[in-house]
Image (tube, rainbow, N blue to C red):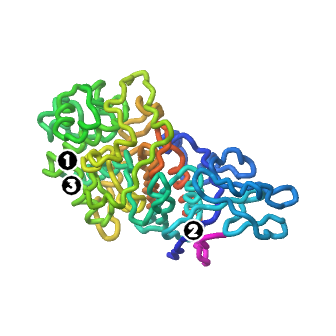
Amino acid sequence: MRIARTSASSGFSVVPNLFRCSSVCVLSVMENQSFDSKAALTSSLITPWEAKPSMIRGSALLRRSQRGSCAMRSMLADRPANGHELTTCGQLAGEGCYFSGAGCVGRGWVRRMADLQGTCDERFAEVRDALAASLDEDDVGASVAVFVGGEPVVDLWGGFADAGRTVAWQRDTITNVWSTTKTMIALCALILADRGDLDLDAPVAGYWPEFRAADVRVRHVLSHTAGMPTWDDPVVVEDLYDWARVTSLLAGQTPRWTPGEVGCYHAATQGFLLGEVVRRITGKTIGAFFAAEVAGPLGADFHIGLPAEHDHRLALSIAPPGGMTPPPPSELFDAEPNPYIEPAHANTVAWRRAEIPSGAGYGNARSVATVQSVVSCGGAVGGVRLLSRAGCERALEEQYQGLDYVLGVPMRYGLGYGASGRTCYWGGMGGSLVFNDLDAGMTVAYVMNQMVDAINGDGRGMTMVTAAYGGLSNATPRTSPIRASR
């Protein structure tokens, strides 16, 4: 497989951020659609810049005048919000538009793209362009990875690790991926089930005798149908650092609905419920089990609970202006967030050191894709087998289909994942995403530090997925390497 190393300016894209609903939202309504062709998926995402220039926010754009010269030369002192400079001219094919070190997108627009580092197979140039465009628009720092057949075909990163844009995002930069962590704990459960140590249809109380809700089964926890989307007793964020306290509170609760009947996203409670089951079976916390049985064998740089020795390479979460908007009340679930978790909480040492399995996993796109490739590749990656092929298929087993009364959108839940056809996925608050296609043997992961205020995430990650399918459609690799700038 021919790999082209990317550095410096990295080309031009026609992927404006038009897809403002979440990756979770979008996939939930695509349940009956095929991914064999990217055309249907991309048609709703991609609009040529000529047609919709007003939709491109925060980009360094210059319109040529009718004479062909840059009409905004006098405004070169201006800079877009992302800090990339506007660039002036060199001759362009007799059109009279001049620029240096940048590029021209269609007729009428010129912009300088973000610098990227990493590797990219020639067929997946669209992914590289999508990341560069995202860094020019919404992102501060980010990484994207695409694995096919367990092998990396895209491993790219760029931008900055800090809000002040003074520290470059590096190859080993990691950040909190929030609820994308749920795919890691789901994998732990699937591994234990594959080994025969965990019966996914068994009552939780069979492993956790103090757990009073006899009708809640492990599969209900994995599919957000256990009826325990939050704690009944008031809790604060600091309580999440006390494993014994929050799990004992859950053990004493009565489900709000008949388990298995109502989908209601267990944003924080899922990790503690599943984590305690894993602890009772293995004698290890779920973070320790993941480190020993998953991340360690795979050599994946992903952590549930971050040791102090990794703090120096951590990119803190950047909250959107105005913070995150909590989900609105629904017909069946009108409780206030309990606790109310803000992006700033994840930037504290206490949060990092605690094991909060639903939302405190630290990694980058490469490590997320490495781990989740186990699911898309039949259970084995890099010569390490963690699951049988049948064990991977269990992620797709439908547990619930209908409205999720927290997210406010129709969902189809498998075992530990959102499921759509032969794909399974989940994302994190603010925008991170991992997407597995079991037929294509492909995993796409997107991780960033700039969060977006959208209840179910935003479209950046799905733009990367769409671009990755474009790569799959390019069956014959190009023979010339991708150039960093065009």
**Which residue ends up furthest to the bottom in the rendered image?**
479
The residue that mark 1 highlights is 278
Name the residue: 63% across, 47% down.
Answer: 57
Nearest the eye: 94 or 348: 348
Mark 1 and mark 3 lie on one chain; the one further toward the N terminus is: 1
The residue that mark 2 highlights is 123
Across and down, in percent, residue 452 comes to 50, 43
Name the residue: 28% across, 54% down.
Answer: 306
Give the amino acid type for the residue marked by disc 2 in the picture: Arg
Give the amino acid type for the residue marked by disc 3 in the picture: Ala
Across and down, in percent, residue 439 comes to 45, 58
Give the amino acid type for the residue marked by disc 1 in the picture: Val
Name the residue: 37% across, 46% down.
Answer: 178
Mark 2 and mark 3 lie on one chain; the one further toward the N terminus is: 2
Nearest the eye: 165 or 235: 165
Is 320 on the left-hand or right-hand side of 248? Answer: right
Whole-Å distance between the Cαs marked 1 and 3?
10 Å
Across and down, in percent, residue 449 comes to 45, 51
Residues drawn in magenta: 475-486
Numbered disc in front, either 2 or 3: 3
Q: Quadrant of residue 238?
A: top left
**Which residue ends up furthest to the right in the rendered image?**
67
Quarter placement of the C terminus: bottom right
Label 1 crowd (10 A; few <14 / some 14-19 / many >=20): many
Q: Which secondary structure lies at badge 2? A: helix
Nearest the eye: 386 or 139: 139
Whole-Å distance between the Cαs marked 2 and 1?
41 Å
Q: Which secondary structure lies at badge 1? A: helix
Across and down, in percent, residue 290 comes to 25, 55
The reply to whether residue 386 is visible in this rendering is yes
Q: Quadrant of residue 214?
A: top left
The residue that mark 3 highlights is 288
